Image: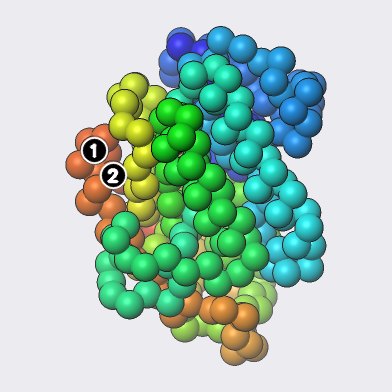
């Protein structure tokens, strides 16, 4: 099987590439500018052929930046999606698309795939549009699409702008300053996601278009994150809060992952304490 992976240099992509190269015999094409393939440039992108599956991870993802640079987000995330779908169509390739949490302030918990969809920021809007494009290419052009609505990810090599690595970095200096401590999130460790990708790849899925919520299935508070970092950190640290609320803040997310568990026989194994321990060990 020949697998094309976009965003191969990113957080998820780098972990996925490392796993596939070490644990499988699949042939990989890293679809990146470094290899001469730009998802925004159809001329070079459409030179690729004989691809069986594309895993689309590329795109801009830091929510605060989506307010400051909307053009970059829509261009990269939406235009890039169109080009990848067209590449799939030309190669008769299946698609796994890494989408995102798209439910806004939830009406009920845990959140399943039937929950109403709401985009609460420009980044989420680009993911919603991308899902709609996937549905269109599936319906009218036969592209088989597996959509993963991934809740909050964390793990080694993640950008320090994201919550858990930001707290770990600040804790090492002895002082942590955070905004609002009240929101709770469903955090999924990167290795559990990589294992899901493996199972999906090996399943050779034949459905036309399906959406799956992907999360650990437990909601964690900021205080629980802090407590787990304390357990694994070599030094003591103090914590202060500004109590500033983010625009479009969501009080709690909790993933109902029963559909993806049933379809691919997947079960996340790494809880928050083990995941944080892994990150801190990898930083030493």
Crowdedness near tag 2: few (<14), some (14–19) or many (≥20) residues, C-alpha within 10 Å: some
Residue closest to the eye, 198 or 96:
96
Taking the spot 61% from the left edge, 80% from the top edge, the residue there is 246
Horizontal side, residue 220 vs residue 26: left or right: left
The image position of residue 280, as x and y in percent, is: 55, 51
Secondary structure at numbered mark 1: helix
Horizontal side, residue 136 vs residue 282: left or right: left
Disc 1 marks which residue? 263
Question: Does residue 206 show up?
Answer: yes
Residue closest to the eye, 230 or 208:
208
Horizontal side, residue 22 vs residue 172: left or right: left
Secondary structure at numbered mark 2: helix
Taking the spot 69% from the left edge, 43% from the top edge, the residue there is 79
Taking the spot 51% from the left edge, 82% from the top edge, the residue there is 181
Give yes or no for contact between labels 1 and 2 (Cβ–Cβ under 8 Å): yes
The image position of residue 269, as x and y in percent, is: 30, 45
Residue closest to the eye, 284 or 10:
10
CA separation, marks 1 and 2? 5 Å
Q: Which mark is residue 22?
A: none
Disc 2 marks which residue? 260
Question: Does residue 221 show up?
Answer: no
The image position of residue 149, as x and y in percent, is: 43, 52
Check the image and report above or below for 16 versus 148.
above
Check the image and report above or below for 200 versus 106.
above
Crowdedness near tag 1: few (<14), some (14–19) or many (≥20) residues, C-alpha within 10 Å: few
Quarter assignment of residue 186: bottom left
Quarter assignment of residue 4: top right
Residue closest to the eye, 108 or 141:
141
The image position of residue 222, as x and y in percent, is: 47, 74
């Amino acid at each position: 099987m020949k697998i094309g992976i976009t965003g191969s240099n990113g957080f998820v992509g780098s972990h996925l590439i490392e796993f596939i190269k070490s644990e499988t015999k699949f042939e990989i094409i890293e679809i990146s500018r470094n290899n001469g393939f730009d998802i925004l440039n159809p001329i070079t992108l459409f030179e690729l052929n004989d691809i069986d599956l594309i895993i689309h991870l590329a795109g801009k993802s830091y929510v605060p930046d989506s307010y400051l640079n909307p053009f970059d987000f829509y261009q990269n995330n939406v235009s890039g999606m169109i080009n990848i779908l067209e590449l799939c169509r030309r190669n008769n390739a299946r698609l796994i698309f890494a989408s995102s949490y798209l439910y806004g302030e939830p009406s009920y918990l845990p959140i399943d795939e039937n929950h109403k969809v709401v985009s609460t920021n420009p980044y989420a809007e680009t993911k919603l549009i991308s899902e709609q494009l996937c549905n269109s290419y599936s319906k009218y052009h036969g592209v088989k699409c597996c959509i993963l609505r991934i809740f909050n990810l964390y793990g080694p090599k993640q950008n320090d702008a994201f919550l858990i690595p930001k707290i770990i970095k600040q804790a090492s200096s002895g002082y942590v300053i955070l905004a609002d401590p009240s929101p709770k999130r469903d955090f999924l460790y990167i290795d559990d996601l990589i294992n899901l990708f493996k199972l999906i790849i090996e399943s050779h899925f034949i459905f036309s278009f399906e959406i799956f919520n992907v999360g650990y299935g437990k909601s964690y508070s900021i205080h629980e994150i802090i407590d787990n970092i304390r357990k694994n950190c070599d030094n003591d640290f103090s914590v202060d809060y500004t109590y500033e609320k983010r625009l479009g803040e969501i009080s709690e997310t909790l993933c109902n992952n029963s559909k993806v568990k049933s379809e691919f026989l997947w079960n996340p194994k790494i809880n928050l304490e083990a995941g944080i321990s892994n990150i801190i060990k990898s930083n030493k």
